[in-house]
Amino acid sequence: MNILKGLSIIALSALMLSSCKSAKTNVEKKETTEAQPERKKDDVSGFRTLSLDKATITLLNASGSQTSLNGSVRIARDSMIICSITPFEGINMEFARIYINKEGISILNRIEKQYFTISFDEAQNLLGMAMNYNAFESIFTNRVFIYNNPYIPLTSDFNISPLGDQTLFTYSDNKVAQEFYFDAMKKLSGGMISSGNQYSMRWNYSDFDVYNNVNFPKKFSLKIAGPDFHKQVTIQYKSVELDRDRNFEFKIPASYKKVALDELLGQI
């Protein structure tokens, strides 16, 4: 169950990033003619659903040990993300499922018949965390976002500077600093969120291909680092499909036992 534990850490650590105090960094925001005229919650010209199938999910621990399993990621735009974990490619026996929607995160452990769920509001009230669905979806779908903001950001929200053959977009407030990297072809190649000097989350995209006239990465790597943990997950997709009708049903069986946050973290 190392993959489930690793993915649980990543989902929860993304929430935890904003719980630590950090010094406020003043960022000069450049106004450009490329800025959108108004803020929008979504771009309806984008995909309706995104299916990332035949995925190999690899977890690398701080010790250097590595665990690989198979699975899939399905995204209904501006609605939900479902990550299904299976032991072998082509085997439909699911042993873990992670579900993220606009309310929060749920994790099913089908082996132990347990589940964990926490809303974004509960996380903020109990742990001082701030997060929303838009950030998760944006990271999975190769898009720029502003932490804890539901709107598509404007160019003028960022400080923009050249970095070798790349272009760096930066943003910060009194809790979180963000970076986005664009390559010479103007593709988003990676990003970073950090909270002070203690917690950070970095991700990068590679192996781009064209789907429905859209450049999309088939490989996605995410690293989470904190004072007492370090995790890295890489997801390699063999199949990427846009706007395919898929099943997005998520139900927690009545026989499953609810696991508290402390208990879940204690198992990791």
Image (cartoon, grey):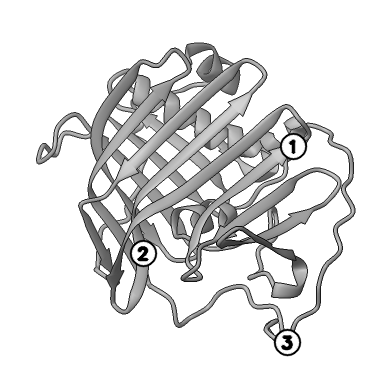
Question: What secondary structure is marked by label 3?
Answer: loop
* Residue drawn 62% across the image and 15% down it: 228
What type is the residue that disc 3 sits on? Thr
* Pointer 1 local density, CA inside 10 Å: few below 14, some 14–19, many at least 20: many
Q: Quick one: label 2 or label 3, which is nearer the N terminus? A: 3
Q: CA distance from mark 2 to mark 3?
A: 26 Å
Task: Give left or right: position of 63 versus 70.
Answer: right
The residue closer to the viewer here, 268 or 28, is 28
Does residue 168 appear in the picture of this structure?
Answer: yes
Question: What secondary structure is marked by label 1?
Answer: strand
From this viewpoint, which residue is outermost toward the front?
164
Disc 1 target residue: 195
Disc 2 target residue: 216
Q: Position of residue 136 (x, y in %)?
A: 53, 51
The residue closer to the viewer here, 32 or 152, is 32
For the residues bearing labels 2 and 3, Cβ distance under 8 angstroms: no
What type is the residue that disc 2 sits on? Phe
Q: CA distance from mark 1 to mark 2?
A: 28 Å
Q: Position of residue 190 (x, y in %)?
A: 52, 52
* Residue drawn 88% across the image and 38% down it: 23
